[in-house]
Amino acid sequence: MRIQGAARSTAILVAGLLLTSAGAYAEDRQIRPFIGATFGGGTTFVNLERAVGKPNPTIGASAVFLGELFGVEVDIADAPGFFESGDTTLPLIVGSRVTTLSGNFVVAAPHRMTEYSLRPYVVGGGGLMRVRTTTTFNVFDVSKVIPQVDVGVGVVGFLTNRFGVCWDVRRFQSVGRKTRNVGLSFGDESLSFWRATMAAAIRY
């Protein structure tokens, strides 16, 4: 409980600092609702249907504040069915999802050089990852909040002054969790995966 409380406090603090400092990066303010997929996952949690490494749909949104080179971002995403294979013959998991909340720093190509073309960027930061599974007979149910870090690359391009598109690939990795939950995790609790998304970039 102490770890979860500290993780929540850290996430709130990071998000607050990012939003407070957003004025310094307010040259280009964007909202990016996105759809995509997670893939290439690995975990020490009980993976009854062996679905963690398979592609799984995800949705979410981010708020981005970009300057000439540097910026900040708050990103939230949800991946329902993360631990489910889709096999309805004998389902071992009746519900699952992984939700991430991240505060990130962004380094982008200079705006003056990419104003009328694709603008590449790198992004990295951290936050929280909530892992939830509901199993048949409730034997291996999981509900955990774990600190995580993420890093990725992407490109954004605008079709008009207000509307554009963005493509993004990121790696998410849980960190700092040294708790062994007998029966739910094989070793220290850990979860990692890739996420690829396409977003609508909306300036405001």
Image: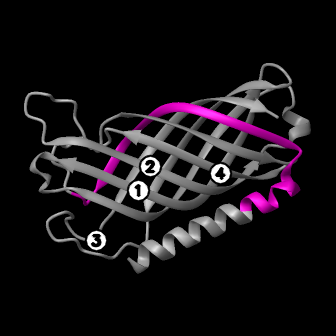
Q: Does the CB distance between marks 4 and 3 fall below 8 Å?
A: no
Q: Secondary structure at mark 3?
A: loop
Q: Earlier in the sequence, mark 3 or mark 1?
A: 1
Q: Earlier in the sequence, mark 4 or mark 1?
A: 4
Range covered by the magenta-colored residues: 18-45
Q: Does the CB distance between marks 3 and 1 fall below 8 Å?
A: no
- The quadrant of the picture occupied by the C terminus is top right
Which residue does the image show at 34% across and 47% down from the upper left?
A: 41
Q: Earlier in the sequence, mark 4 or mark 3?
A: 4
Q: CA distance from mark 2 to mark 4?
A: 14 Å
Snapshot quadrant of residue 200: top right
Pointer 2 residue: 99
Q: Indicate which disc residue 130 carries.
A: 1
Q: Earlier in the sequence, mark 3 or mark 2?
A: 2
Pointer 3 residue: 188
Amino acid type of the residue that numbered disc 3 sits on in the rendered structure:
Asp
Q: Does the CB distance between marks 1 and 2 fall below 8 Å?
A: yes
Give the number of the mark in front: 3 or 1.
1
Q: CA distance from mark 4 to mark 3?
A: 28 Å
Q: CA distance from mark 4 to mark 1?
A: 16 Å
Q: Nearer the viewer, residue 78 or 49?
A: 78
Pointer 4 residue: 74
Amino acid type of the residue that numbered disc 1 sits on in the rendered structure:
Arg
